[in-house]
Amino acid sequence: MNLHLHFILVNSEFNKGLADDLYEGQESEDNIKHLWEDEFLVSEPVKEFKIKNNTIYTLAGFFPDDKPFSFDIWDMSVVDCFTESGKTMQFAVSKKLVKKTEKVVKEKSGDTHMYFYLRDAMPMENPMNGVYILKTDFPKELKKIKNNEN
């Protein structure tokens, strides 16, 4: 199957009543429903995927001096994708950021779309594509590096 992951930041100031009354339920220039959307198509056909809620996600990489780092982030929703070639890929979002999820399967095309609607009230970090972490849960050691780069 082709797996598409959508991460959508919902505008908490969207006024459904205004949209219904003046724009046939649709958003308008002054009443935007979603602030942004990131869409990812998993790079290989997916044999299976699982969503684990309230789990730990390990954020790993290298500091600028090539020293490795690894931080456990708690209370995450993690999507484990198992590809037909045997690879495993992960996408993750802080559980508190998720307003709702939705799964849409398109049988004819073999596409599955997973939608993660995110709350805009809490600041987040996006350290890499497909990973969204509450700013308060983001490792302080990585914040220092990010601030030094700016």
Image (tube, helix red, strand yellow):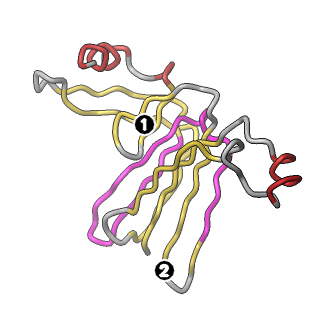
Label 2 to label 1: alpha-carbon separation: 29 Å
Looking at the rendered structure, the kind of residue marked 2 is Gly
x 60%, y 35%: residue:
97
Please give the residue where the numbered disc 2 appears in the rendered image: 110
x 32%, y 72%: residue:
84
Q: Residue 122, relative to residue 22: is it above or below?
A: above
Q: Quadrant of residue 25?
A: bottom right
Residue sticking out furthest to the bottom: 108
x 87%, y 47%: residue:
17
Residue sticking out furthest to the left: 65
Q: Earlier in the sequence, mark 2 or mark 1?
A: 1
Magenta stretch, residue numbers? 77-104
Question: Magenta stretch containing residue 114, yes or no?
Answer: no
Looking at the rendered structure, the kind of residue marked 1 is Tyr
Please give the residue where the numbered disc 1 appears in the rendered image: 57
Determine whether the residue tagged by mark 2 lies in a helix, strand or loop.
loop
Point out the image quarter for the C terminus: top left
Q: Residue 115, relative to residue 130: is it above or below?
A: below
Q: Tell me residue 108's x, y (percent).
A: 54, 86
Q: Tell me residue 98's x, y (percent).
A: 62, 40
